[in-house]
């Protein structure tokens, strides 16, 4: 089973709202990722958690706050977002972080910020 | 800055033809390469992983890697309309005890019935 699940599938929020995106995997993977994808563009890495520790933050604005409560779960807390933050947010996981590890993507959360 | 480049397309081929998708990368030290397929509105799904020079075949898909020339390609034989999607070439980069995929811009493939 190579399934990564994400909730919600769609989210509409105002610029003053606080919301959270959730990601879950039960493959025993020890690395989890958040990517952001705008239309007609490739995914862009936001954060990497390795063994439940934040290992990479790609200079993401503080209005995005990641959290890894345990090895199966990854959250992305959203606060005071801007309309330009509207995008598809993808979670991925991999067994480890070596160059031969396949990253498996969840279905994504499509976010619209009004 | 490590770069991965693909022709953005769109690439249009008739049903039953061979579709050829190309990718070049700038880091001569890159060792492994991924091809993902992404349907419109969906998430990327893995098609092929290759790390050795030469060809790797999986069903109708063949990945070709030439490290000396720094390119990796994906051939789709007997193309079907259901192959119409964006194909993303990705190269992993390991740093800071983590890793990320560096994606090309993607090639949009359209297979006409």
Image (tube, rainbow, N blue to C red):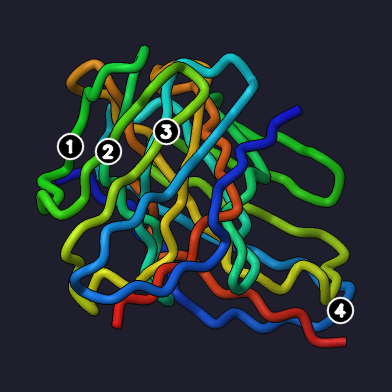
Spot occupied by residue A66 in the image (x, y as percentages of width and height) = 27, 38
Residue on which disc 3 sits: A74
Residue on which disc 2 sits: A66
Q: CA distance from mark 1 to mark 4?
A: 43 Å
**Nearest to viewer (mark 1 / mark 4):** 1
Spot occupied by residue B22 in the image (x, y as percentages of width and height) = 51, 59
Give the quadrant of residue A81: bottom left
Q: Residues within 10 Å of mark 3 (few under 14, many from 20)?
A: many
Residue at 54% across / 57% down in the picture? A8
Label 1 or label 2, whichever comes before in sequence order: 1
**Nearest to viewer (mark 3 / mark 1):** 3
Closer to us: A28 or A22? A22
Give the quadrant of residue B6: bottom left
Residue on which disc 1 sits: A57
Q: Residues within 10 Å of mark 2 (few under 14, many from 20)?
A: many
Do circles 3 and 4 both sit on a common chain? no
Spot occupied by residue A106 in the image (x, y as percentages of width and height) = 58, 46
Which label number is shown at residue A36? none
- Name the secondary structure under disc 3: strand
Spot occupied by residue A20 in the image (x, y as percentages of width and height) = 37, 50
Q: Left of A96 or right of it: where is B1?
A: left
Q: Chain of mark 2?
A: A
Q: CB atoms at circles 2 and 3 under 8 Å apart? A: yes
Query: As drawn, which residue projects farthest toward the bottom?
Result: B113
Q: Chain of mark 1?
A: A
Residue on which disc 4 sits: B15
């Amino acid at each position: 089973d190579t399934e990564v699940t994400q909730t919600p599938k769609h989210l509409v929020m105002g610029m003053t709202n606080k919301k959270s995106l959730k990601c879950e995997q039960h493959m025993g993977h020890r690395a989890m990722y958040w990517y952001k994808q705008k239309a007609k563009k490739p995914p862009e890495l936001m954060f990497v958690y390795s063994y439940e520790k934040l290992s990479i933050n790609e200079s993401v604005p503080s209005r995005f706050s990641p959290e890894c409560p345990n090895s199966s779960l990854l959250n992305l807390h959203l606060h005071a977002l801007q309309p330009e933050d509207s995008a598809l947010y993808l979670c991925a996981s991999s067994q480890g972080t070596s160059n031969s590890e396949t990253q498996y993507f969840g279905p994504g959360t499509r976010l619209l910020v009004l | 800055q490590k770069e991965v480049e693909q022709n953005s397309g769109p690439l249009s081929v008739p049903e039953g033809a061979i579709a050829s998708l190309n990718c070049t990368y700038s880091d001569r030290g890159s060792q492994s390469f991924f091809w993902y397929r992404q349907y419109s509105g969906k998430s990327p799904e893995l098609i092929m992983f290759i790390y050795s020079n030469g060809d790797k075949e999986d069903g109708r898909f063949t990945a070709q890697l030439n490290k000396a020339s720094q390119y990796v390609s994906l051939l789709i034989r007997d193309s079907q309309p259901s192959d119409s999607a964006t194909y993303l070439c990705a190269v992993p980069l390991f740093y800071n005890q983590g890793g990320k995929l560096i994606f090309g811009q993607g090639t949009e493939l359209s297979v006409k019935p």
